[in-house]
Image (cartoon, coloured by chain):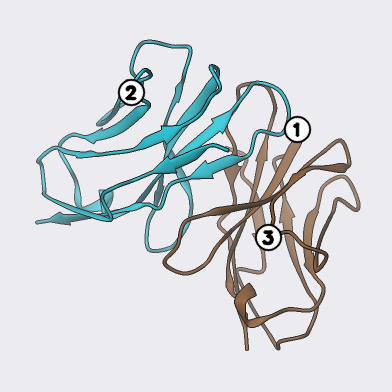
Chain colours: A brown, B cyan
Amino acid sequence: EPEVTQTPSHQVTQMGQEVILRCVPISNHLYFYWYRQILGQKVEFLVSFYNNEISEKSEIFDDQFSVERPDGSNFTLKIRSTKLEDSAMYFCASRAGGRQPQHFGDGTRLSIL
Amino acid sequence: AQTVTQSQPEMSVQEAETVTLSCTYDTSESDYYLFWYKQPPSRQMILVIRQEAYKQQNATENRFSVNFQKAAKSFSLKISDSQLGDAAMYFCAYRGGVQGAQKLVFGQGTRLTINP
């Protein structure tokens, strides 16, 4: 069964550094998402992406965040200047469209030191 | 804005018994989807079951079933014949509409413990 893959599984970065989290969605999917889960808390929506542009973003997704689909297969989340509070699990998800559910990757654990 | 509430932070059940996890939501939309996701200690997000609001019949997937009460905006998950592998965090989630990107809105989660 096709799946969403995320790399790396764990990223450790110094505060203030830029970080890029990578995702390969399922190949025929059209909608892409990033979610965040701070340890012990609920999963929060960050951004959705469709037709090569952001379709919706949350208040969390400020100017420090950006997303890109550079080559038709990868979907990346960039955090420009990381803060301690960016430490969380980041999940990528994709969806085919219509009434189909979102499929999640295994997540990237981001630790900011 | 839509909200999802799980009022049980923790639940426990004896192995082979049945347990029900509660979820309520708030929305003004008439067409939407509801989901239960399982998150084991590995922190993957695994889809357990889904319900489309226009369907009156409750969804079932093997030992997992839901009780969907649209008027009450309630969506509980029943796990029958609980197994040790069912131990995890369970999240209820809402997705609105049939058009557009349709983000998921999650509840706070319920940690389920299975006692052998």
* Residue wearing tag 2: B72
Q: Secondary structure at mark 2?
A: loop
**Percent position (x, y) of residue B71?**
36, 18
Numbered mark located on residue A28 in the image: 1
**At 43% across and 63% down in the image, what residue appears?**
B42
| Chain of the residue where label 1 is placed in the rendered structure | A
Q: CA distance from mark 2 to mark 1?
A: 37 Å
Q: Secondary structure at mark 3?
A: loop
| Chain of the residue where label 2 is placed in the rendered structure | B
Q: Nearer the viewer, residue A8 or A35?
A: A35
* Residue wearing tag 3: A60
Q: Secondary structure at mark 1?
A: loop
**At 33% across and 29% down in the image, what residue appears?**
B74
Classed neighbour count for the residue bearing mark 1: other residues with Cα under 10 Å, few (<14), some (14–19), many (≥20): few
Give the number of the mark in front: 1 or 3.
Answer: 3
**Left or right of B65, for residue A51:** right
**Left or right of A61, for residue B23:** left
Three-letter residue code for mark 2: Ala
Q: Compared with residue A93, is residue B54 higher up or lower down, i.e. above or below?
A: above
**Percent position (x, y) of residue A19?**
77, 74
Three-letter residue code for mark 1: Asn
